C-alpha cells in the first residue's frame, strides 16, 4: 500500500504541474481510453515518447539561399542574350507602330566596328555622350552629314577644314565619311583629330564601269543609314565646299525635305552661279539656274543644296510612299541629273518641300570647283626624315642659347 500511494502522489504531482514543452509531447486522442491494467504509470508514457527539440541555426538558411541566388546569377550570365544592335529603340515620332519595327537612335558607341566600318570617337576631351545623341530635346534633331572623299593632293586640307566646321556645330551630329576600296590610315587620323563623332565607311564598288564615284559612295552611306535605322536629317556635304554655321542651324528645322539656294564658283567662269529654289516664305514656287544645259531638269538643286528626313529611307509608311523601293542615287543618268532623279524618289512636287531660310534669300554654302589637276599627289602625308635648315649664327633660341 505505501508504494501505491507514492505512485499516485507522484502522478498527481505531474498532473498538477503545467506542461511547458508541448512540442515534445505526442498527439493523444482524448477519446481513447488507456488500459487500466497497464503496469506503467501515465507519466511513463509521456517520458518514453518525448523527443528532444532541435534548434537549427538561422545563418545556415541564409547561406543556403545566398548560394542558390549565386548559382542563378551565374547561369543567367552564361545565357546568350541578344546584342544591343538587335534591340529596338523607342522613337516618339512613331508611337503607333509595333515595338519590333520602331526606329532606333543607335550611335557610334552602340555599333560594333567591322572590317569595312570604323567608329571614331572624339579623343580631345569634348563631350559627346550617348544620352546627348539619343535625346533630341537637348540640342534638336540629329544631323547625319555624309561626305564622300578620295585620294588627291588637297584631300587632307579639305577634310581638316570641314572637320573644324562640324566641330563648331552643337551635337548631336554624326559625320559619315566614305572612301573607295580601303579606309586609309591618314583619313582615319584626320577624323580622330577633328573631335567629331564619325563613322568611316568603305565603298567596294568595282570602279571599272563607274561614271561617278560619289554616287556609289553616297549610296553606301544610305545603305548604312537604312540598315541601322538612324533617325535624323541627312545632308550630303562634299569635302571641297564651304559651309556656314547658319546652314546647320536651319537643317534642324526640316520636317521632311528642305531646300535652299547654293552659290557656285569655278575657275572657268568669272562670276558666281546661283542655283536653287524661288520661295514665298517657306513655300517653294519655282527654280532659278544660270546654266542652260541643265534647264531640262525637274528640280534645279545642287547636291549640297538639300537635306531630308532619314526615316523616308527606311520607313515609307510614315510618309505614305506608294512603294517601298530602296531610295538610291543613279549612276546611269546624265551628268548633272543625279540630284533631280534622286529628289524625285523622295518627293512628288514642290508642295512637299520646305524652303530655307524663309524667302530663300540667304546663301549658306558655296560649291567650289577649284581643284587643280596639275598637282602631284604625295606618296605620304608625313616627312620620313628631318629637313635641312639654314639658320644664322646670331639667332637666339627660346632657351636663351646661341647656335655655334
Image (spheres, rainbow, N blue to C red):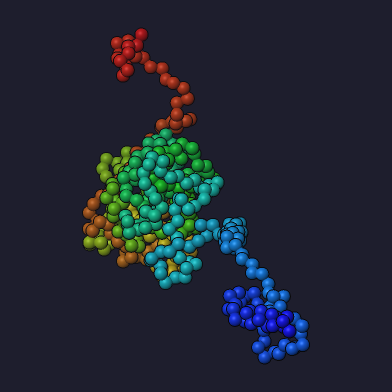
At horizontal 36% and vertical 8% (from top left) the residue drawn is 404
User: In the figure, residue 31 lies in which quadrant?
Assistant: bottom right
Residue 342 position within the rendered picture, expressed as x and y whole percent measured from the top left: 41, 58
Taking the image as shown, residue 400 lies to the left or right of residue 192, namely left
Residue lying at the far top in this picture: please name it: 404
Taking the image as shown, residue 244 lies to the left or right of residue 216, namely left
Residue 119 position within the rendered picture, expressed as x and y whole percent measured from the top left: 47, 46
Taking the image as shown, residue 348 lies to the left or right of residue 227, namely left
Residue 325 position within the rendered picture, expressed as x and y whole percent measured from the top left: 48, 64
Instruction: Name the residue nearer the viewer: 367 or 76.
Output: 76
Count of marks, rendered view:
0
Residue lying at the far front in this picture: please name it: 2
Instruction: Name the residue nearer the viewer: 266 or 248.
Output: 248
Taking the image as shown, residue 194 lies to the left or right of residue 245, namely right
Residue 98 position within the rendered picture, expressed as x and y whole percent measured from the top left: 47, 70
At horizontal 55% and vertical 59% (from top left) the residue drawn is 82
Instruction: Name the residue nearer the viewer: 290 or 363.
Output: 363
At horizontal 48% and vertical 30% (from top left) the residue drawn is 379
At horizontal 74% and vertical 88% (from top left) the residue drawn is 36
Identify the image quadrant of the N terminus: bottom right
| Residue 104 appears in the picture as rendered | yes
Instruction: Name the residue nearer the viewer: 26 or 10.
Output: 10
| Residue 297 appears in the picture as rendered | no
Whether 89 is drawn above or below 14: the answer is above
Whether 327 is drawn above or below 48: the answer is above
Amino acid at each position: 500500500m505505501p508504494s501505491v500511494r507514492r505512485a499516485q502522489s507522484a502522478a498527481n504531482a505531474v498532473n498538477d504541474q503545467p506542461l511547458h514543452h508541448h512540442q515534445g509531447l505526442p498527439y493523444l486522442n482524448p477519446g481513447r481510453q488507456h488500459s487500466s491494467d497497464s503496469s506503467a504509470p501515465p507519466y511513463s508514457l509521456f517520458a518514453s515518447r518525448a523527443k528532444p527539440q532541435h534548434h537549427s541555426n538561422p545563418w545556415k538558411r541564409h547561406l543556403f539561399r545566398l548560394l542558390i541566388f549565386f548559382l542563378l546569377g551565374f547561369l543567367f550570365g552564361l545565357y546568350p542574350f541578344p546584342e544591343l544592335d538587335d534591340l529596338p529603340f523607342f522613337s516618339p515620332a512613331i508611337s503607333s507602330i509595333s515595338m519590333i519595327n520602331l526606329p532606333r537612335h543607335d550611335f557610334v558607341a552602340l555599333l560594333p566596328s567591322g572590317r569595312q566600318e570604323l567608329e571614331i570617337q572624339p579623343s580631345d576631351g569634348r563631350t559627346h555622350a550617348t544620352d546627348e545623341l539619343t535625346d533630341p530635346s537637348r540640342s534638336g534633331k540629329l544631323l547625319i552629314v555624309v561626305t564622300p572623299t578620295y585620294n588627291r593632293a588637297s584631300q587632307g586640307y579639305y577634310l581638316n577644314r570641314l572637320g573644324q566646321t562640324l566641330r563648331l556645330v552643337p551635337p548631336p551630329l554624326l559625320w559619315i565619311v566614305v572612301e573607295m576600296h580601303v579606309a586609309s590610315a591618314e583619313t582615319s587620323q584626320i577624323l580622330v583629330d577633328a573631335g567629331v563623332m564619325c563613322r568611316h565607311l568603305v565603298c567596294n564598288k568595282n570602279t571599272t564601269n563607274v561614271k561617278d564615284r560619289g554616287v556609289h559612295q553616297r549610296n553606301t552611306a544610305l545603305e548604312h543609314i537604312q540598315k541601322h535605322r538612324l533617325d535624323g536629317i541627312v545632308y550630303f556635304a562634299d569635302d571641297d565646299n564651304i559651309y556656314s554655321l547658319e546652314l546647320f542651324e536651319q537643317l534642324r528645322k526640316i520636317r521632311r525635305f528642305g531646300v535652299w539656294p547654293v552659290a557656285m564658283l569655278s575657275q572657268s567662269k568669272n562670276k558666281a552661279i546661283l542655283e536653287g529654289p524661288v520661295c514665298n516664305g517657306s513655300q517653294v514656287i519655282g527654280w532659278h539656274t544660270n546654266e542652260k544645259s541643265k534647264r531640262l531638269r525637274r528640280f534645279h538643286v545642287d547636291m549640297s543644296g538639300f537635306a531630308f528626313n532619314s526615316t523616308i529611307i527606311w520607313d515609307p509608311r510614315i510618309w505614305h510612299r506608294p512603294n517601298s523601293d530602296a531610295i538610291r542615287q543613279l549612276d546611269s543618268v546624265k551628268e548633272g541629273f543625279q540630284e533631280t532623279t534622286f529628289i524625285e524618289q523622295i518627293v512628288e512636287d514642290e508642295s512637299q518641300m520646305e524652303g530655307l531660310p524663309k524667302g530663300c534669300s540667304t546663301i549658306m554654302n558655296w560649291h567650289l570647283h577649284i581643284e587643280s589637276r596639275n598637282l602631284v599627289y604625295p606618296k605620304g602625308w608625313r616627312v620620313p626624315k628631318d629637313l635641312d635648315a639654314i639658320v644664322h649664327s646670331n639667332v637666339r633660341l627660346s632657351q636663351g642659347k646661341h647656335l655655334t
